[in-house]
Image (cartoon, coloured by chain):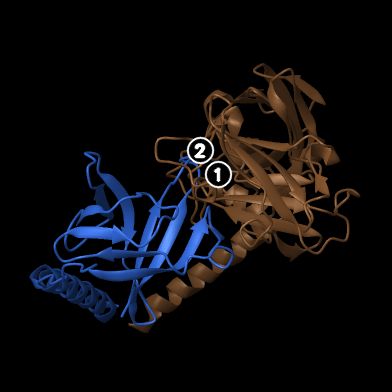
Amino acid sequence: MKRPFQKLTYLYLLIGLGMTLFLVHCGLTALTVTVPTQAKANEIATFYMHSGAEPQIEEPNTYTTQLLAGIMVPKSWNARKNAVLTYTSSKGNGTLRMIPDAETEPVSGLSWHEAAKKMFGIGPNLIDDFEWIIYRSTQSFTFVNNEHQTADLSFDVKVECRVGPENMLASLGFYVGSSIENLRPEDTDYKKYTFSNPLEIIEGEGDLIDFVNPQLGTVQPVKSLDNDIVTLTFDAGVTNTDLDDMDEIYLSAKAFDETGQLLDEITTRDDKTKLTDVGGKKFILDLWPRGYFNIQKESRIAKLEYFYTDATGTKKVGYGNTDEPFTYTFRCE
Amino acid sequence: MHMKRLSHWVFTVLSLITLSSCEEEMSNIVTDETAKDVTGNWKVLKLTRNGEDLSKRLDLNDFQISFKTDGTYSLSEQLPFVVNDAGNYTLSDPQFPFSLILQPEGETTEVPVKFQFPVVKGKRQLSLTFSLGCSSNTYQFDFERQN
């Protein structure tokens, strides 16, 4: 009874060894991207990914796969609905389709989109309001050993995406991979990803949302309502201000409703308004706006205007280190 | 050679018998899952926002939710929560609930909340997941029962 199991074990070992040899010697070339420095809000922008295949396959001498390509863009672009990905290559041209959410990436057990977010992160962006979206080519490709030595196996992926209504400065993420692989951390051959130089969206709505440069004051989550718990951060390391070397930083804030009417103003300096020093010259304050300002049931806070002050309240810092207050508008879209 | 073939057949038949007997045993097991009892006072142990732990940064010591045997619940103080007022509660299923349904007094709308009831270090925890403002922001409250 022992022998069939032994044979099975040998078979698994052989398959494992074969797969290892097969995987070690094949891969993709470095990924480069072409992204404009500016794009107009609500218009379609075009980005390109450039890469290629290097099939050094020992066994079984051919490798058949589909192309994976991914983008990391601001959530507000709604790219899942409006991005279109196509590719051109010496092996043919075609389209890529978004991988369904229900399909899991084998290593992480997450959807491919969540797995990519977990693995690649948000690159040089400092505020997280981005989503990774992974696509797969509808066609398959077969490579033979050392094919790249005699043929051009480079390919380009074209991304066309409407960029959303907001003015912003953001670095975008890009990924190419092979469908029969996974996102295992140690692999550097089959997953290539990079982040673009900052892209500025112009002629759109609202103040510039700067994801790339350190900000004196930020609010997380980027999208929230007055019943969310928000975290206000003052980063004293960004530039020299009147609050340099202060041990205690306080919030001085006003809450307005949709009509612009002042609902409440809190300028006291006490435990409630004191920010917590979290190191690295950063101070944070977590607050539930409705409770912080004691808002009545029928009222809604639409906007906050605020400054950061010292313990005496005489020194204060506003948006961009000016006398203008920081502003935060509560919204989900 | 003949013996080898015979042994394979015996092995296959025995395996099938074993498997089929397992199936019968499984179908005969009576599921005796107890109804989930959430009554009592529950205190916040952990609060996460989009996976980020906020419990050490926010003072949640005074926030409690109480579930009574008469099907009512109450909140100890005003804090960010999926409902603001006391009311009635039900579980989506007495034995295998996947949501806790809250209905604040005077309101007709029921508020379903994702419900988990894990045992952690020998103690039941009540874990409720919901959004407070934007649906893109998810909060998970983990409660422990107060004695």
Amino acid carrying label 1: it is His
Q: Is residue A307 left or right of residue A291?
A: right
Question: Amino acid type of disc 2?
Answer: Ile
According to the image, label 2 marks what residue? A99
**Tag 1 residue:** A113
- Chain under disc 2: A
Q: Tell which chain the image draws in blue.
A: B
Q: What residue is shown at x 27% (from left), y 56% (from top)?
A: B98
Q: Is residue B67 above or below residue A305?
A: below
Camera-side residue: A91 or A298? A298
Q: Where does the image place residue A12, in percent across and percent down from the top left?
A: 50, 68
Looking at the rendered structure, the secondary structure element under dot 1 is helix
Q: Chain of mark 1?
A: A
| Dot in front, 2 or 1 | 1
Estimate the x, y position of residue B125 in percent, counting from the top left.
35, 71
Q: CA distance from mark 2 to mark 1?
A: 8 Å
**Quadrant location of the N terminus of chain A in the rendered image:** bottom left
Numbered disc 2: secondary structure? loop
Res A193 label: none
Colour that chain A carries in the picture: brown
Instruction: Please identify the quadrant where the C terminus of chain A is shown.
Output: top right
Q: Earlier in the sequence, mark 2 or mark 1?
A: 2
Are labels 2 and 1 on one chain? yes
A214 over A138 or under it: above or below: below
Residue A281 shows in this picture: yes
Verify CB contact (< 8 Å) between mark 2 and mark 1: yes
Relative placement, left or right, of A291 versus A50 is left
Q: Is residue A88 visible to us here?
A: no
Q: Residue at x 55, y 61 (%)?
A: B54
A281 sits to left or right of A115: right
